[in-house]
Image: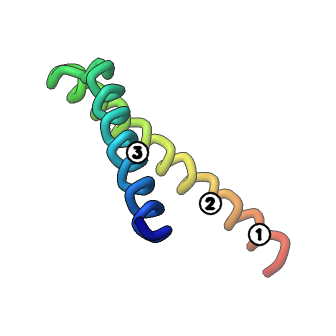
Amino acid sequence: MTTMAVVLQSYLERIKKFVKEVRSELKKVTWPTKKELGAHSVVVFVTVVFVAILIWMLDGGFNVVMRFFFY
């Protein structure tokens, strides 16, 4: 075999091993139920909206302060 063929064969063996190990690890995962997924999605959505409103209010407050001092 040429050096290139050996390198390619080694590379393919490593890919096969990686895929096999990934499949093995994914079998160990505890996947959420539809109910849990829905509940977690609602929590994430509410948190994102809350943080967005908080940042919007802080931005408005800083804008008022900057206008007071610099205009």
Secondary-structure class at tag 3: helix
The numbered mark, 3 or 1, whose residue comes first in the sequence reads 3
Q: Residue furthest bottom?
A: 71
Q: List x then y, in percent, for residue 32.
A: 24, 22
Q: Amino acid at mark 1?
A: Met
1 displayed left or right of 32: right
Q: Amino acid at mark 3?
A: Val
Relative to residue 69, is residue 45 depicted above or below? above
Q: Residue at x 48, y 50 (%)?
A: 52
State the separation of the CA atoms marked 2 and 1.
Answer: 10 Å
State the separation of the CA atoms marked 3 and 2.
Answer: 15 Å
33 displayed left or right of 27: left
Q: Residue furthest left?
A: 34
Q: Residue at x 35, y 35 (%)?
A: 22
Q: Which residue is mark 1?
A: 66
Label 3 vs label 2, nearer the camera: 3
Q: Quadrant of residue 71?
A: bottom right
Q: List x then y, in percent, for residue 16.
A: 33, 45
> Label for residue 59?
2
Q: Residue at x 38, y 57 (%)?
A: 9
The numbered mark, 2 or 1, whose residue comes first in the sequence reads 2
